[in-house]
């Protein structure tokens, strides 16, 4: 019998600081999929804010730290398409022209790194979960997971197995919510219009909850829904798949 794969969880900054329950849900799902899970203490930011801002020097320095922290694991799994995309797509680009040895290490890490739900479905072959949630929901496709990693069908496959869950497709599900990492800081007016349109589309579904696989999108969407007075909660898909829905919704303070 093959040994269970050793999986390192790249927690992400937003999960660490704003929504630790997503990290615990990710661990539960990975263990359900037969993995041995660790969260390396030396991990830090993936470097995406620096990279998106054109600060390649700091992005490379951070990438070196991440490459070292996650060496030796069979897989690295990330509950975020944007952070997973940074490692899989952009780490090799950072070292492509000048550092062959570091490029080889970056490429090796990229090949072992996966977004959480796509890892469960595409690598571990998971087709269903044991969770139950008597709720109506809709799903927003986060840009990086969709466009860089091809995450589309995988979350819908697993959500279809959640007992009691009614999932309604979101008009414009593939349209950006306007967060875009540093985009919302550089272009706040455009960002606000985009998330406003997204909030209206979410409300039109009649769903009680909007789900997504990226916490940045969910924080942005939850904030706009609250400011518009739209009573739709936001949750990370991992929490629903793991049956961890007893925590307050994103943006809602604990009682």
Image: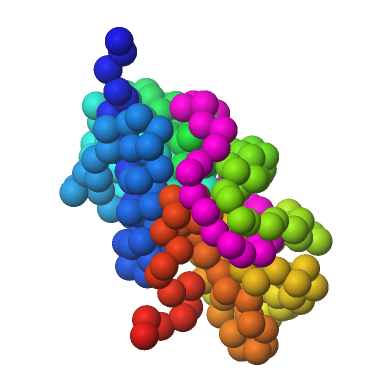
Counting from the top left corner in percent of width and height, residue 121 is at 54, 32
Query: What's the residue at 48%, 35% (across, down)?
Result: 120
Counting from the top left corner in percent of width and height, residue 158 is at 58, 42
Q: Is residue 30 above or below residue 217?
A: above
Q: Is residue 229 left or right of residue 37?
A: right
Q: Quadrant of the N terminus?
A: top left
Residue 86 showing in the rendered view:
no
Q: Is residue 231 magenta?
A: no
Q: Quadrant of the C terminus?
A: bottom left
Q: Is residue 245 left or right of residue 121?
A: left
Q: Is residue 129 magenta?
A: yes
Start-end of magenta stretch: 122-148
Residue 30's quadrant in the figure?
top left
Q: Is residue 132 above or below residue 186?
A: above
Residue 43 showing in the rendered view:
yes
Query: What's the residue at 73%, 54% (across, down)?
Result: 174
Query: What's the residue at 48%, 72% (across, down)?
Result: 250
Q: Is residue 113 left or right of residue 161?
A: left
Pick out the residue farthest to the left.
Answer: 41
Q: Is residue 255 above or below residue 162?
A: below
185 or 227, which lies in front? 227
Q: Is residue 99 above or below residue 26?
A: above
Across the whole image, how many numbered discs are drawn on residues? 0
Counting from the top left corner in percent of width and height, residue 183 is at 59, 67
Counting from the top left corner in percent of width and height, residue 16 is at 32, 62
């Amino acid at each position: 019998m093959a040994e269970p794969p050793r999986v390192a969880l790249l927690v992400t900054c937003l999960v660490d600081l704003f929504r630790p329950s997503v990290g615990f849900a990710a661990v539960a799902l990975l263990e359900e999929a037969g993995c041995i899970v660790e969260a390396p203490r030396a991990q830090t930011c993936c470097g995406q804010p620096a990279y998106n801002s054109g600060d390649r020097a700091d992005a490379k320095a951070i990438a070196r730290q991440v490459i070292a922290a996650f060496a030796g694991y069979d897989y690295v799994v990330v509950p975020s398409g944007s952070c997973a995309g940074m490692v899989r797509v952009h780490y090799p680009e950072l070292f492509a022209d000048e550092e062959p040895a570091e490029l080889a290490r970056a490429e090796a890490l990229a090949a072992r790194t996966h977004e959480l739900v796509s890892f469960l479905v595409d690598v571990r072959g998971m087709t269903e979960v044991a969770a139950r949630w008597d709720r109506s929901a809709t799903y927003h496709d986060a840009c990086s997971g969709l466009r860089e990693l091809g995450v589309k069908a995988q979350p819908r496959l697993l959500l279809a197995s959640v007992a009691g869950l009614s999932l309604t497709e979101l008009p414009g599900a593939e349209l950006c919510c306007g967060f875009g990492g540093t985009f919302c800081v550089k272009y706040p007016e455009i960002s606000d219009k985009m998330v406003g349109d997204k909030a209206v589309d979410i409300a039109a579904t009649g769903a009680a909850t909007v789900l997504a696989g990226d916490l940045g999108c969910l924080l942005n969407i939850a904030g706009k829904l609250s400011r518009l007075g739209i009573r739709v909660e936001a949750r990370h898909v991992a929490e629903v798949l793991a049956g961890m829905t007893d925590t307050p919704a994103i943006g809602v303070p604990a009682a």
